Image (spheres, rainbow, N blue to C red):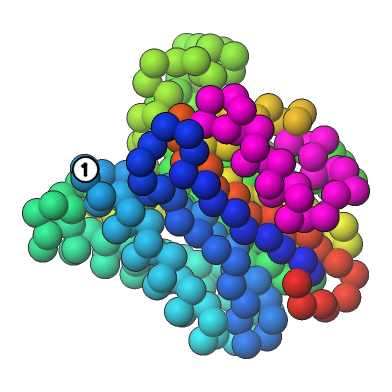
Amino acid sequence: MDAVFQTDVGKIRLHNEDCGGIFQNKDGYYLAVVADGMGGHLAGDVASEMTIAYLKKEWEGTENIASPDKAEQWLKEHIAIINRLLFDHSLQHEECQGMGTTIVSAICTEQFATIGHIGDSRCYILNQHGFQQITEDHSLVNELVKTGQISKEDAEHHPRKNVLLRALGTEKEVKLDIKTITVDAHDQLLLCSDGLSNKVSEQTMADILASNRPLKEKAETFVRLANEHGGEDNITLAIVQFSSECESG
């Protein structure tokens, strides 16, 4: 496998409330994570950074996550723990009241990827069947689309587009959406915050991933395009490319 992570503050905001990374455990398997923090003052930074620091530490110390069942259990268990840690922190620190974060995470082995998410940060896959979004946004506008009240095109410009129905850390307990998919050599996963998905079309995403550019250049291209299209939000992404045999990326 090969992987790359990139984050950028964008062109408008003073602080980057996104956080993320790509981490390897003792077996060499990847955990890719993107978190988009939210809250007053710098509380969004706190929520996303606490989440990533916790998951990094726990993942790097783990091993024998070689089956989908174990991967799903690991994500459920540790997302529940960090959710409670964030929630308790917000209660104990007045400046962090109401803080939370989205999260999209993927445990990646050579045979499968287990994806867990809360909020509107997304995971996409490019494989032999084309390019598609794996996750489903936990947002008000997505619910309106699902119930037929607005079109998908209307959702792109809806004034309440940023309203989340679910986030990590805002309540004592939270539901994690989780699924496992099989992967083949050369498949690519793209995890990103809405600072990217709101600014770069799915067709453009697919074209960039399908190109022969190095992964680092693909990531840099995503950031550049999001900034060229306004860059009003922080921009964060991770790309994981699967290979036919274990390699360190």
**Looking at the image, how many numbered discs can be counted on the residues?**
1
Query: In the image, what residue occupies the spot 76% across and 50% down?
Result: 217
* Residue bounds of the magenta highlight: 205-231
Image quarter where the C terminus lies is bottom right
User: Is residue 96 left or right of 208 when viewed as pictured?
Assistant: left
Amino acid type at mark 1: Gly
Q: Nearer the viewer, residue 129 or 96?
A: 96
Query: In the image, what residue occupies the spot 43% across and 24% down?
Result: 161
Does residue 170 show up? no
User: Is residue 114 left or right of 126 when viewed as pictured?
Assistant: left
Q: Nearer the viewer, residue 12 or 56?
A: 12
Q: Nearer the viewer, residue 9 or 40?
A: 9
Q: Is residue 70 magenta?
A: no
Image quarter where the N terminus lies is bottom right
63 versus 79 height, above or below: below
27 versus 202 height, above or below: below
Does residue 57 show up? yes
- Would you identify the image quadrant in which residue 199 lies? top right
Question: Element type at marker 1?
Answer: loop
The residue that disc 1 covers is 40
> Callout 1: few (<14), some (14-19), or many (20+) C-alpha neighbours within 10 Å?
few
Q: Main secondary structure of the magenta part?
A: helix
User: Is residue 17 left or right of 126 when viewed as pictured?
Assistant: left
Query: In the image, what residue occupies the spot 71% across and 41% down?
Result: 221
Q: Is residue 210 magenta?
A: yes
Q: Measured from the top left, where is residue 96 in percent x and y?
A: 18, 53
User: Is residue 238 left or right of 53 when viewed as pictured?
Assistant: right
